[in-house]
Image (spheres, rainbow, N blue to C red):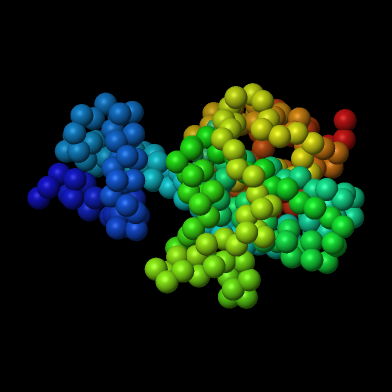
Amino acid sequence: MDDFISLQRSIERLVRIKCSNYKEDYIKRRILSRMRLTNATDYETYHKYLLANPQEVDLLRNALTINVTKFFRDPEVFEVIRREILPDLARRKKSIRIWCAGCATGEEPYSIAILAHEMMALHRDISVTIYATDIDTVVLQKAMAGIYDQKALENVDEKRVRKHFISHENGTFEVRPHIRELVKFRQHDLMSGVPAVRYVDAVTCRNVTIYFTEKQKNDLAHLFHTALGIDGYYIMGKTEYLGREVEHLFVPYNVMQKILQKKAP
Ligand SMILES: C[S@@+](CC[C@H](N)C(=O)[O-])C[C@H]1O[C@@H](n2cnc3c(N)ncnc32)[C@H](O)[C@@H]1O
């Protein structure tokens, strides 16, 4: 059997990821990045390494899912954004600014834009801008194209699909202009030490820091603290947490959903 096919079989069994869900080119790029880091020169050597080192299974899983995202990923968090955070910001501000950091292919900022659009229908004097950034220009191009397959829309109810997407004959869905125009995409490295935007009312940075060291995570908390305005919200991923050294910068808002608020100076 071909070395790559045999490796894929082990990946499906150990990593529990269906390789056929991804483009072959994508799978190969991610495996190659793990091969470089483990000094494996060919698929066979890497395959043996994977079988002999249980920790590599987790590292490979992370490498394969690094850009994975979908609309309304963790719907409960978006429910809090819809029911509490956007209405609170609308009471305080006429012009709301949200930074979606590590936005990958755009599903997260567009989900927030959908909620913002619904809120703006009730408050016609309020405007919302979502700044969506990522380090990876390939994912940003896809984000800007705004075209998705059915699977990405799994958590979007039918009414929202009809209202906010154009359904194409080839089975894809394109984000409509009234949602697109709320989101500004730009490339930005979260480790650069400089925020992509300032005076923001909320930052979402979800499922981004899996590879970050404790120091990098702490620096990031400082970066978001600088970027946020008074009482601004910091929305983390479900498995992410704030390090002890930076706990004093924020107060918990919703512990279950990993939402914090900037502490007043
Ligand atoms: C799993 S996706 C998360 C997408 C979305 N936030 C979500 O939760 O569904 C992680 C994204 O973080 C981006 N990322 C990783 N390191 C980064 C960095 N230093 N600066 C900016 N983005 C980064 C990756 O390129 C990837 O697109």
Q: Residue furthest right?
A: 92
In which image quadrant can residue 251 be found?
Answer: top right
Q: From what the image shows, is residue 262 above or below residue 173?
A: above
Q: Nearer the viewer, residue 255 or 72?
A: 72
Q: What residue is at 73 percent from the left and 48 percent from the top?
A: 129
Q: Residue at x 57, y 66 (%)?
A: 165
Q: Position of residue 248 (x, y in %)?
A: 78, 32
Position above or below: 221 against 94? above
Q: Is residue 8 left or right of residue 206?
A: left
Residue 53 visible in the snapshot: no
69 relative position to 49: left or right: right
Determine the residue positioned at 84% across, 42% down: 231
Of the pair 160 and 166, the residue shown nearer to us: 166
Where's residue 155, x and y in %?
56, 67
In the visual, does 4 lie left or right of 94?
A: left
| Residue in the foreground of this view, choosing between 238 and 194 | 194
Quarter of the image containing the C terminus? top right
Residue 120: horizontal and vertical position, in percent? 79, 61
Can you tell which quarter of the image residue 100 is in?
Answer: top right
Relative side of 200 to 221, left or right: right
The residue at 52%/49% (across/down) is 143
